[in-house]
Amino acid sequence: MLDRRSFLGKAATGLGGIALLDLLQRDRLLAAQPIRPDILPTRPHAARPPHFSPKAKQVLVIFCSGAISQMDTWDYKPELAKRHGQPLPGADGFITSQGQQGNLTRPLYPFRRYGQSGKMVSDLVSRIGEFADDICWVHSVKGKTNSHGPGENFMSTGFTADGFPSMGAWATYALGSENESLPAYVAIPDPRGKPQSSVNNWAPGFLPAAYQGVDFNSTHPVRNLARPASIPVTADRAARDLIQSLNRRHLERFPGDTDLAARIAAYQITGRMQTSIPAVSDLSREPAHILKMYGADDTKTKHKADYARNCILARRLLEKGVRFVQLFNGSYQTGGEGTSNWDGHKKLTAQYDVHGPIFNQPTGALLRDLKQRGLLENTLVFCCSEFGRMPTFQKGASGRDHNPDGFTAWFAGAGVKRGHTHGATDPFGWKAEQNPVTVHDLHATALHLLGLNHERLSYRQNGTERRLTDVHGHVIKEVLA
Amino acid sequence: MKIFYSRIAFASLLLTFVGGLGAIDVDELPPPAKHEVNFVKEILPIFKKHCVKCHGPDKQKSDYRIDVKARAFEGGEIGAAIIPGKSAESPLVHFISGLDEEVLMPPKGDLLEDKTVGLIRAWIDQGADWPDDAGAQIADPMEHWAFKPLRQPGTPRFMDPMDAFLWVRLEAKGLKFSQQADKRTLIRRLYLVMHGLPPTSAEVTAFVENKDPRAYAKLVERVLASPRYGERWGQHWLDVARFAESHGFEMNRERPHAWRYRDYVIDSFNADKPYNQFVKEQLAGGTFGAEAATGFIVAGPHDMVLGSDPAHQATLRQNDLAEMVNATGTTFLGLTLGCARCHNHKFDPVSQNDFYAMTAIFGGVQHADRTIGSKNKLQRKTKLLAELEAVEKSLAELLKPPVAYDRNEEFFAPVKAKSVRFTVLATSNQGEPCIDELEVFGEDNKNVALGGTLKSSGNFANNPKHKLAHLIDGKFGNSRSWISNARGKGWVQITFLKPARIERIVWQRDRQGKLRDRLPTNYKIEIESAPGQWRVVASSNSRVPFGTKFDANAVAARKDLTEVQKIKTTALLKRHAVLRKELAEIETGSLAYAGKFAKPPKVFRLHRGDAMQPREAVAAGTLLKFNGARFAAEATEATRRTALAEWIVSPENPLTARVIVNRVWQYHFGTGLVDTPNDFGHNGAPPTHPEFLDWLAADFITHRWSLKHLHRRILGSRAFTQSSAPLPAALKRDAQSRLLWRFPPRRLEAEAIRDSILAASGKLDLAMGGPGFSLFEIQKENVRHYFPKQKFGPADWRRMVYATKFRQELDDVFGAFDCPDGNQSVPRRGRSTTPMQALNLLNSPFMLDQANHLAARVKKDAGPNVEAQVRRAFHLTLGRVPEIHELAAAKKLAADHGLPALARALFNTHEFITIP
């Protein structure tokens, strides 16, 4: 038993001081001091300054879910056509996700030359080819998994496991948004359903729930947004008034309570969101020529018209200052491999003949629209897929298996070179050969364009400084304008 | 002379490099310097200038650090880099020589001059002398507060020790404890923290009016004895244990038997199972008589998409094992063991070898259901079957289940009949209806249909399997059935040999249970009592509609039942489910998602964590720096897990007690004494009150690792019972209230908000245990798709800890309140405030329903007087009387827009969802 004096003496020289000193010393040793944004509890989505002057203020991700085939779209491989029907050199006994390889198979769609850059792009994505001079192609991306779920996680969150924050969550955590009356981060799922890795693609992981992507699209509005039909406007307003007056009274009793102040602010914002989200989602005012340009008037192909509407929605959100928009093409719902996404294992041509037209015109129109409205000045467009596909057909099938060893992603817009190609796969489009780029590098580059240092933007979780790029990643200097 | 060495280690540095053996001609090496070399003056500056950027304090590429004596000699991934006396054989010299194009050090910039290489050679040849005090010094990683044995700081006697340690830090900062919280606040805080439910208004009144000085202590005992405690604190544990009831990843299939682990956890908390026992059971349950407990090991995500690629498959298996090791480390030890998967832990004394020794412990664990419990209890079975029959009969009188493909029974009051007619009005798939047999029974259980004469609306043509005669041939199955000739409709009629007294009809599409189509879903059955006089005795109208689950929600939806009948039906239904389940388990044994255990394979250290790069073999074992050991090669699978468990709870392990005591503290106050509860290593945060943490941990062990003992201590402390009012002066010095000059108020978690709403509305169903209820509709393709339910009923009104926890998918209303997605251990919930939360609480169908229920309850309790209603509504939701202005505003809302509007508003107040 200790008396007060000796107890005090012991406690004062106790371990706390030592441990703290130790911590400080270690922190000083770390080369890149972490930067954690200073977030106002009452305004978690207020715009916050980047680490340095940014090239891009907003991001549009176009995610081709299911793994789009690079050699049938934008990675032109004449050698593959020449060697059609021959075995893939160096792939003797090579086993991919679904098993053994058949022979090399030529590009399944004709390619033609576009723009001054003379980029070869296939007819399947011709409308994107029209913007070849605006696009910065990266043909040498390497992933690290050949399974869809982990692959989509990797591309969206930097980790193959579920449960990590998505790139959009990181961006809005760092930067907030230019428009606090709309969600800072919107995920637009394909009209056919969610992507392969579902909500992981826009999850907040361990970041605060405020940085979760809000998912809605042209056919599925934000859940619980609208005032229920059973509650008249006046009753709704009166109930909200009472909530706020009770909360304000609570705040008088608990002055300075930041959680409480944040709740009062959140209820104020809901009122604005109930007006601004339906307004931004309302395409009825879009002129006929715009609907036509996107293909939203296509009455024969409902999926295409719905995806086109999603594309228009994406543009409208960007126009309103939403920080991060993630547009999906392809879903795993309603059928699994190939039938509603780019996962062409068995009958690739039959499947891509369906998906190509859904994707091509609306996405091309989105690029056109962003460009003609000047939105590309401030917006970084990033088109990706969880991985690529093999230059061979699968043994006994007419489709291509997964290939994470070399595939294509592309950038366009703010801060990136125009009409430029970075990196290359081998002559068949199998492995990244020239200037290989990791998924972390793509993330580092996107953050860099937003004015964020990927090595310093961090969140402390379980005692670890977490980053989008984990302990990897280099900004791809060669793609910067 | 050529020298060969392994170079795989450098593959990652040189991205295009493919592993193999390299060689240089040592004769080409620059000659060693001739003079006696001084390490401090001549060598160390070279290291600092050219090497430490990549092999120094910030980075240790290839796991090599050159500026610290021990590490420089020890080497990195390739083994020793410096061989004293032999510069020509030292890999370091080869790498810096510039002779091997595949390993050039430094990799960027100019190569070292020959003169420099010569200096280093000379230093090595002369014995590589390195004075101990030269170069960077690194502390022994064991020199860390949490790795030292628990200290016994001595018990202060001038004040209750629970207050003394905090008081010292407060006083040092010029702060003091706040005054005692008022009783209303205190009981509400106590219930919300310990049960995740508010006290009932009767409990509040009784406590406030109780003058007994021991009233609070007695209340604490009552709260600890309630099973609500285990449900609340079990949820905390399930967060840490990353528990979920689906596999995760793209398929995300269900784990229908995972709930047994959830029940095990809740039961353990309620029983105040000693924590050391609790730990041991979860790692080696079978050995300790708690089989479902090993659900912990396999509670994490598991990717089912194996594919054909063996490298991918091996990686997935390693991911599973790493996940188990990491979960064990963070949960019980507060150590981030996962960091040692690819290299030695960067901060803590955990080697990569340790990591693989731990994976070897779990090497035999497979993600799978396991049969637990005993089988074939015949007597019990007979008894249960008898009860089941009785329950089914009573049930049938009230409400019948939806039609089934394999057997349907119709009961009616005994009646004399000469014919029976079965008319089909719709089928399950719009096809022609099919019935394989129609049996008609009297009191003596004799099938009077046999031998009767048949008529029908028309018969399926030209198929020997489907004939009208098959309807009463006493044979079952598709090949002995009748099918109508019209899609979705048709009728059959049997005229008995002679009129008979009948009371029961049995029919089905396929008694063999093979085919699931053509089922009559809308039908009526008539009897002919006198010639030409037909009347309906049974029809699909008295059944729960086809395609609907037969549960409490289906009962609640019936308009044809009285309230009393509904209550009776629901009770019968529950009993029915329990009986069916127990019977099924007697047949099969119970299944639990608790892992299957096989003989563990041999384990190797994996270079850079890559499953395709095995290195030396590693024996199973525990962390060597923490009194761990490597087990004998013949140690069986179960022995390994048992040894691990015993090591974790051994009194010499400095982490286990500290970690759990800190967790318990955190769930009381919102923040732990260490605010990185899953990381007590060098990278974690230091404790605010280190002596106190040790004192608590030691006291906890002394009191037989009893969590309830620890609760009693904390709940009785000044820190817990003081006011939470903010004081500007104190906020300035300690804005986070980390030193506990007040009780820090905080928002409730998702589950507690939902449970509190149901408690206030009076709809909370306190049924414990068993399979959970679902917050989602599931589309069962190969891959599962989850859609948040939009309509809820009584079956969904249990506590949320019993909601089936699907990975990734968050509830549409409460998911936004930082609900974990089940993918990672969550040691502490986020407490963010967002507009989406507000929208969900304002507008979701669940909330509107509950607002209506609360309004109805208030009306029933308080009568028609609006003021009485408002007072009652405040009491039920906030546990207090309204202030005068609040009363006026609330009365106006209720009078103008009805009680549901007031209920909706009260559920949305900050106060309702806050621990005060």
Image: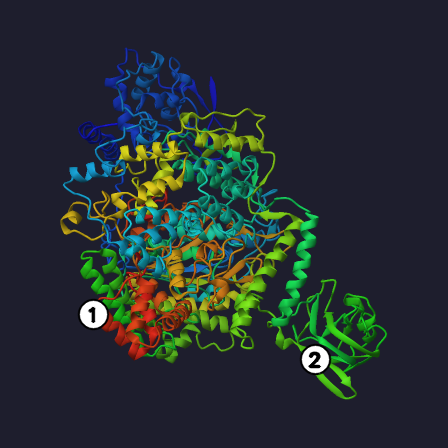
Task: Give x and y (percent) for residue A31.
Answer: 27, 37
Q: Can residue A46 be seen?
A: no
Q: Which residue occupies the foreground of this view, B881 or B218?
A: B218
User: Disc 1 is attached to a residue of which chain?
Assistant: B
Q: Residue furthest front?
A: B212
Name the image quarter holding the C terminus of chain A.
bottom left
Give percent across and percent down for residue B153.
Answer: 27, 28
Judged left or right of residue A434, residue A338 is right
Image quadrant assignment for residue A377: bottom left
Q: Which residue is mark 2?
A: B489
Q: Nearer the viewer, residue B212 or B903?
A: B212
B694 relative to A452, above or below: above
Instruction: Give the numbered dot on residue B862.
Output: none
Residue at point 24% right, 70% down? B887
Total of numbered circles in the picture?
2
Residue placed under numbered mark 1 in the picture: B885
- Label 1: element kind: helix
Of residues A272 and A406, the one nearer the viewer is: A272
Q: Earlier in the sequence, mark 2 or mark 1?
A: 2
Coordinates of residue B893 in the picture (x, y in percent): 28, 75
Q: Residue at x 43, y 55 (%)?
A: A200
Which amino acid type is marked by label 2? Answer: Lys
For residue B395, above or below residue B594: below
* Residue at the spot 63% in from the left edge and 57% down from the top edge: B580
Looking at the image, can residue B263 be seen? Answer: yes
The amino acid beneath tag 1 is His
* Label 2 residue SS: loop
Q: Quadrant of the N terminus of chain A?
A: top left
CB atoms of marks 2 and 1 within 8 Å: no
In the displayed structure, B705 sits above or below B820; it is above
Local packing at callout 2 (Cα closer than 10 Å; few below 14, some 14-19, many 20+) is many
How far across and down, in percent of the image, does residue B368 sit? 58, 45
